[in-house]
């Protein structure tokens, strides 16, 4: 579960009651820290809190001072394990320095509203925030189909330009800009779209995959052509349960029109599969050869296929599935070599067998290995041990 998921229910409750609140956001980290920039914690006036800004060693200390620190407006506070300027800061437990933006509801409210909208729409969001001077806490957003709120209408065009640049590059950034006659620090937090996992196959082995993906805060859909399996009763945690009309799959042929426009979700009318986004993951695991082949054909025919497509089972079976996919999509059987080349090209795009080599045997450990590989691919990570990646240990000796 993400910070946003933890925070939004409490925020909605406080907004409905007209209560004030404090939002703490990690805006910078020096050295080691459990949480990275963008981590959030919401504080209610009755002592409740949601989200975290550390591994548990800073939250109580931050909460004890946040209300009086923000009495006159937003502020940035540093928390470190070392004494600083004669003051006794709070220990982070990791040997690093964490900078937090602390703010009340007037500036935090528009941010939380934007985060809610981005979460619901599964859209990327770039948030540019002024961290210094009289404009501290002022924000602009890029990536949502919404106009600026009253709280940010006077933000400089330059800050908006920074937000748009961050959205285009898909990277957070920090820079100094002139504001009110002085230089002000602006931090732009790029938040990628909420990932989605589409589980094509509603067997018992899909249930642990669903549970674990929901723990990660992902949107999860389950789809199957068998109506007695694809039910909300079997998958109560799923964001969507869909009974596929497998006879209508694939929706298009390679010689026809694409099922989705590049960079946009496939509409229900265009694809019976559902509203897949380019940043999503799809796993094909119905244990039915015919159904798996039709689902794979529909996925591979999309103009913007999901970022990850995994197929359960041995590579031999997947190659056989792809030969059937070629037939379903109307590839010519003669010359056979052209079809064989396309099958191998598809095979190179798929994750088959899906999952990392973790010694998985049970449905739960298999689900864990699959989600680990999806996380690796979506994040562009290495899946190497952190002591190798960050500790300077040669991979060969690890």
Image: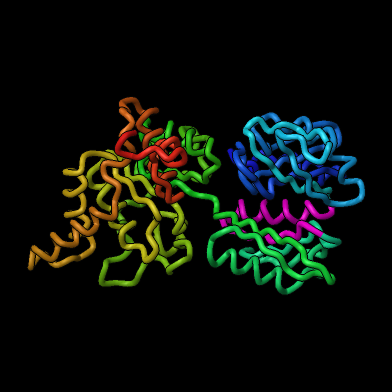
Mark count = 0
126 or 262: nearer the eye? 126
Question: Which image quadrant is residue 4 in?
Answer: top right
Q: Which residue sits at x=69%, y=46%?
A: 26
Measured from the top left, where is residue 395 in percent x and y? 33, 39
Q: Quadrant of the N terminus?
A: top right
Q: Where 332 sits versus 275, above or below?
A: below
Measured from the top left, where is residue 166 in percent x and y? 59, 64
Measured from the top left, where is residue 134 in percent x and y? 86, 61
355 or 282: nearer the eye? 355
Q: Which residue sits at x=78%, y=32%?
A: 61
Judged from this view, the residue extending furthest toward the top is 362
Q: Which residues are magenta?
A: 106-132
Question: Which image quadrant is residue 20 in?
Answer: top right
Q: Which residue sits at x=48%, y=65%?
A: 264
Q: Is residue 228 visible?
A: no
Measured from the top left, where is residue 218 in percent x and y? 52, 44
Q: Quadrant of the C terminus?
A: top left
Position of residue 119 in the picture relative to residue 382 (left or right): right
Q: Which residue sits at x=29%, y=44%?
A: 311
Q: Where 12 sits versus 250, above or below?
A: above
Q: Where 219 sits versus 160, above or below?
A: above
326 or 351: nearer the eye? 351
97 or 58: nearer the eye? 97
Q: Is residue 199 visible?
A: yes
Judged from this view, the residue extending furthest toward the bottom is 157
Q: Where 225 sits versus 180, above or below?
A: above
Position of residue 225 in the picture relative to residue 17 (left or right): left
Question: Which image quadrant is residue 358 in?
Answer: top left
């Amino acid at each position: 579960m993400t910070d946003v998921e933890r925070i939004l229910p409490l925020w909605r409750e406080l907004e409905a009651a007209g209560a004030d609140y404090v939002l703490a956001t990690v805006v910078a980290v020096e050295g080691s820290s459990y949480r990275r920039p963008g981590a959030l914690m919401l504080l209610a006036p009755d002592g409740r809190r949601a989200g975290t800004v550390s591994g548990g060693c800073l939250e109580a200390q931050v909460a004890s001072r946040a209300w009086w620190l923000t009495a006159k407006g937003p502020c940035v506070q540093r928390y470190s394990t070392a004494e600083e300027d004669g003051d006794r800061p709070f220990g982070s437990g990791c040997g690093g320095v964490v900078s937090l933006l602390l703010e009340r509801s007037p500036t935090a409210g528009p941010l939380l509203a934007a985060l809610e909208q981005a979460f619901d729409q599964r859209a990327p969001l770039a948030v540019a925030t002024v961290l210094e001077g009289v404009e501290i806490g002022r924000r602009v957003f890029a990536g949502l189909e919404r106009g600026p709120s009253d709280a940010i209408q006077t933000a400089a065009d330059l800050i908006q330009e920074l937000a748009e640049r961050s959205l285009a590059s898909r990277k957070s950034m920090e820079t100094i800009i002139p504001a009110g006659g002085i230089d002000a620090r602006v931090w732009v937090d790029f938040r990628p779209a909420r990932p989605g996992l589409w589980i094509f196959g509603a067997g018992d082995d899909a249930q642990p995959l669903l549970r674990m993906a929901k723990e990660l805060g992902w949107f999860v859909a389950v789809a199957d052509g068998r109506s007695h399996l694809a039910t909300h009763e079997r998958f109560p945690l799923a964001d969507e349960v869909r009974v596929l009309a497998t006879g209508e799959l694939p929706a298009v042929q390679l010689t026809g029109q694409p099922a989705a426009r590049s960079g946009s979700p496939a509409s229900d009318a265009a694809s019976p599969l559902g509203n897949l986004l380019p940043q999503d993951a799809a796993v094909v695991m119905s244990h039915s050869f015919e159904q798996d082949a039709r689902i794979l054909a529909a996925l591979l025919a999309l103009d913007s296929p999901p970022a990850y497509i995994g197929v359960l089972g041995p590579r031999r079976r997947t190659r056989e599935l792809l030969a059937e996919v070629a037939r379903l999509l109307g590839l010519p059987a003669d010359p056979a070599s052209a079809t064989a080349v396309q099958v191998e090209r598809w095979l190179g795009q798929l994750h088959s067998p899906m999952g990392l080599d973790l010694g998985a045997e049970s449905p739960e450990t298999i689900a864990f290995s699959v989600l680990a590989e999806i996380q690796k691919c979506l994040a562009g990570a290495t899946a190497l041990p952190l002591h190798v990646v960050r500790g300077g240990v040669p991979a060969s000796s690890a």
